[in-house]
Image (cartoon, rainbow, N blue to C red):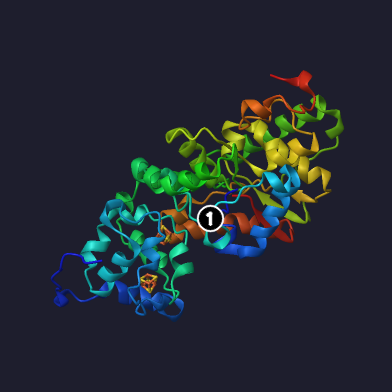
Amino acid sequence: MQDPCQIVRKSYGDPIAEDLRFVVKSIVGEENLIEMYPNKSNNYCCGGGGGFLQSGYKDARLSYGRLKDNQIQTTGADYCVAACHNCHAQIHELSEHYGGGYQVVHLWTMICLSLGILGPNEREYLGDDLKEVNIFHPETAM
Amino acid sequence: MSETAIKLDYKKGSIFIDKVQALLPDGGNLNLCLTCGACSSGCPATELSNMDPRKFLRYAAFGMDEEILKSDWVWMCTMCQRCVYVCPMKIDIPQLIYHARASWPREDRPKGILGSCDMALRNDSCSAMGTPPEDFQFVVEDVLEEYREAQPEFKDMEAPIDKQGAELFINQNSREPVTEPDELVPLWKILHIVGADWTYGSKGWAGENYCMFLADDESWEKVTRTTTAQAEQLGCKTFLNTE
Ligand code: SF4
Ligand code: SF4
């Protein structure tokens, strides 16, 4: 899971990083959360912040994100939870650009999936392994 | 660690760093650098555009204002503050960078950020995509209606706009209502299940603020004041920025 700079280091610090972990572990199971290091308040920025996504310096932005992509690929995880819009957009692009093939999901998607209330059209960012799992009202698929 | 020697030209004077120091609490500690390099070694922007945070600060301290004020690296720092976090002297380098951004003529700043800020100034939504309030309202109502019918367990689910006295004022990144409206729904469901008393605002509903990234203080303040004024006018107790 990504520790968004804006939420963790720049706002509420390690306590909210722990809260995020509590939620993610409750959803996926403790043994399925693989940490990146450094993390929490000492986390590396993904490169999506500060306006970088819209600045036009795309190559620089992808180089910046290389460190984050390496961290994620090192975990071998299939999913990266990104509870920030900028992180989500940037890491999603990193996965495609560097060929990591991991999925990048919003926290709300994972919460609703675990509660069994995620419909068929709310699965834009799930991979094939989870696209068909526990679908709420499958008949409404579009 | 050796770098090519640089010739200092003190005649120019270190005007820029003095100006920024005067603006920051405790001067942002800008003159306390030990040159240890902890900032640069953990900064993902190090080496982009041949710059890094320590070097940037050194240039500023030496009064080499031209080097830093013309460097496009200021747009490659994400203001993530990791350098401040690891710095033994807690030196606020990103603030220095922010002010370097602000020193660029507005029209020369990156077009994408500039355009997103100008879009936000177009109407009361403050959306970087320029979406007017009525379009936002239409999408929210339309999607809500559709899901209440399709998923009857959520027939009482709400997605209020301008609900007077709601506990939470929640804003929303423009990407969902504009490009992927189905992605709005999981958040609404969670809020419904936990019984949250919340509302969007017709004004200032958009969570992103590119005027801040643009270092356009006046516009940044306008966007922020629009959204907070709406939350206050509705009597909301907590402002939740989902961005
Ligand atoms: S970490 Fe702080 S003290 Fe060390 S070089 Fe960077 S700014 Fe200077
Ligand atoms: S705030 Fe800027 S200079 Fe500091 S670590 Fe982050 S990207 Fe680097």
Q: Tell me: is circle 1 under 8 Å from ligand 2.
A: no
SS under mark 1 = loop
Amino acid type, residue under disc 1 in the picture: Tyr
* Residue A8 placement, left or right of B159: left
Going 67% across and 37% down the picture, which residue do you hit? B184
Residue A56, horizontal then vertical, whole percent: 36, 42
Q: Residues within 10 Å of mark 1 (few under 14, many from 20)?
A: few
Q: Is residue B39 above or below residue B170?
A: below
- Residue A5 visible in the current orientation: yes
| Viewer-side residue, B161 vs A59 | A59
* Residue B90 placement, left or right of B12: right
| Number of residue marks | 1
| Viewer-side residue, A119 vs A105 | A105
Q: Quadrant of residue A103?
A: top right
Going 27% across and 61% down the picture, which residue do you hit? B69
| Viewer-side residue, A95 vs B139 | A95
Q: Quadrant of residue B68?
A: bottom left
Which residue in the protein does label 1 denote?
A37
Residue B198, horizontal then vertical, whole percent: 76, 50
| Viewer-side residue, B90 vs A52 | B90
- Residue B187 visible in the current orientation: no
Residue A20, horizontal then vertical, whole percent: 67, 54
Going 69% across and 19% down the picture, which residue do you hit? A142
Going 34% across and 77% down the picture, which residue do you hit? B34
* Residue A126 placement, left or right of A135: left
Residue B51, horizontal then vertical, whole percent: 29, 58
Ligand 2 is found in the corner quadrant, namely: bottom left
